[in-house]
Each structure stands twice: as structure tokens, then as C-alpha cells.
Amino acid sequence: MRNTVIFGNWKMNKNKKETLDFIKEVDKLVAKTNTVAGIGVPFIYLDEARKQAKNVNIIAQNCHFEASGAYTGEISIDMLKDINIDTVIIGHSERREYFNDTDADIAKKVKKLIDNNLTPVLCCGETLSQYENKETIAVVKKQLLENLSLIEKNNVEKVIIAYEPIWAIGTGKTATAEIAQNVCKEIRNIISENFGAKIADKVIIQYGGSVKPNNIAELISQPDIDGALVGGASLDPKSFLELL
Ligand code: 13P
């Protein structure tokens, strides 16, 4: 039985007071749900957010794969561990598109996170034109096989996979539950064929892209969708609690 895992990805939103007020409002209530809940807060608020949160997981939105060195503006996994962060979103389409995160870079991040016992939330997904050209599965397969290529087979179950069609992110166009289920099922098949059925059965697959309180129930009731990675609708505490 796989857990239901719902993470907010705040991206570059909220200031310090808003971050801490949000946690104050949701943290106790999160404990009353059966869902594994988390929020991806901006780097500079991670430490205080982590200290304040008892129930909601505080997760990072990125990391560098090198342990230290001359990488201006970057944050290492050791720095995240130092403030007790154990989960990191990587390979988000915005990182791939605006910051040139390549599949090879993402593979190194997955490996270093696993080596350090942190959980990668590995994002994958196709553009609108790839979707229209029916290339979704080929695109996602190429991303996943390359991104998972540096870790041992039996560590693949420790990775949370987030399927986020780029055409559905921030656009209000959610993939229908049927489309999302079909792709998540194919992702599970890809994991099964390449890493084994037992691992495929355990791996958590989230859907992301315009998930809202009014569409989440149908999405996560699908057999291969184990949760959601939510942008806009995770920013408001009431909406976040409704999602959970
Ligand atoms: P929206 O929920 O705002 O579409 O964002 C999805 C996303 O990118 C989460 O990582």
C-alpha cells in the first residue's frame, strides 16, 4: 500500500512572515490527515520553517550535486542536511527551461541525494507540442531513464516521481484524470521494465499541473496516482488544507 503524498511547491513566492504564518495555520491540522504533506519553501526560509514545523514536511526546491566549491548562488546537499531538510524537488520543468538543468545534471543530483539518504522528488513531463505530437511517453521515458541512470536499481523506490505536463503548469489546464492516469501507469510500466515489478509497485508517483481542491479527489483516486505536486493552490493555507 503506497502512501498518499501531497507537496506544495511555492516556487519564488512568499516572504518570511507569510511563510511562518502559513506554517502556524496549517501545521496542527496537517497531523489530523492521513496524507504525507510537505511544502517546498524558498531556500532562505527553509531553516526557520523547518524549526517551526512539527507535522508538515519542509522541502527544498533544488540543490547542487557538488559537495562544495566555487558555484556562486548554489546550495549543496550538505547545507540542506545541516538544517535537517530531507526531501528535495529536482528537475522541475522551470529549472530545466530557465536554468538549463540537463538530464545529466539531474541524474547527478538524484545520485547525490540518494547517497546522502535524502528523498529526491524527480519531476518529468512534456511540452505542449510534444503532447500534441503524441511524444509524451517517449519524452518521459528518456528523462526518467537518464535521470535514474546513476543509482542502484533497488534505490529507485526511494525516489518520488512527479509527472508534470508542462502545458498544465500554471495554465489552469489540468490533464484530465484519464490522461494523467494513463501517463502515470506508463511511468510505472517503465519503472517495472527497467528496475523490476516490486520496485514499480512501491514507487510513489505524483501528478502536478493545475491541481486544485476541486479536481484533486478525482486525480488521486486513480490507481497509479499516489499524490500531487501543487503550485498555485498550495500558496493559500485554506486551499492547501482542502487539498490534504
Ligand atoms: P500549478 O499547480 O500552479 O500548475 O504548478 C504545478 C507545479 O509546477 C508544481 O511543481
Image (cartoon, rainbow, N blue to C red):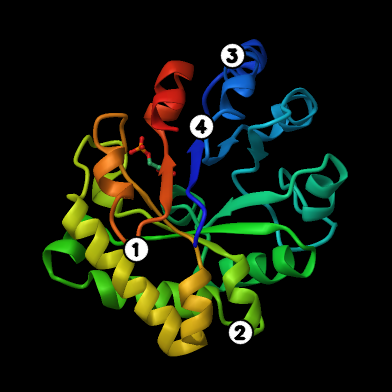
Judged left or right of residue 148, residue 47 is right
**Visible residue check, residue 50:** yes
Q: Is residue 148 above or below residue 9?
A: below
Given the current orientation, which residue lies at the most extreme left position? Answer: 132
Tell me the CA gap for discs 1 and 2.
Answer: 20 Å
Q: Residue at (66%, 58%) from the top-left corner?
A: 119
Q: Nearer the viewer, residue 36 or 50?
A: 36
Tell me the CA gap for discs 4 and 3.
Answer: 16 Å
Q: Is residue 35 above or below residue 136?
A: above
The residue labelled by disc 3 is: 25
The residue labelled by disc 2 is: 153
Q: Is residue 177 above or below residue 217?
A: below
Tell me the CA gap for discs 4 and 2.
Answer: 31 Å
| Label 3 vs 2, first from the N-terminus | 3
Question: SS at mark 1?
Answer: loop
Q: Residue at (78%, 52%) from the top-left corner?
A: 76
Quadrant containing the C terminus is: top left
Look at label 1 and name its amino acid.
Asp
Question: How many neighbours does mark 4 have within 10 angstroms: few (below 14), some (14-19), or many (20 or more)?
Answer: many
Question: How many neighbours does mark 1 have within 10 angstroms: few (below 14), some (14-19), or many (20 or more)?
Answer: many
Foreground: disc 4 or disc 3: 3
Question: SS at mark 3?
Answer: helix
Look at label 3 and name its amino acid.
Glu
Q: Position of residue 32 (x, y in %)?
A: 57, 28
Residue 224's label in the rendered image is 1
| Label 4 vs 1, first from the N-terminus | 4
Tell me the CA gap for discs 3 and 1.
Answer: 31 Å
Judged left or right of residue 115, residue 196 is left
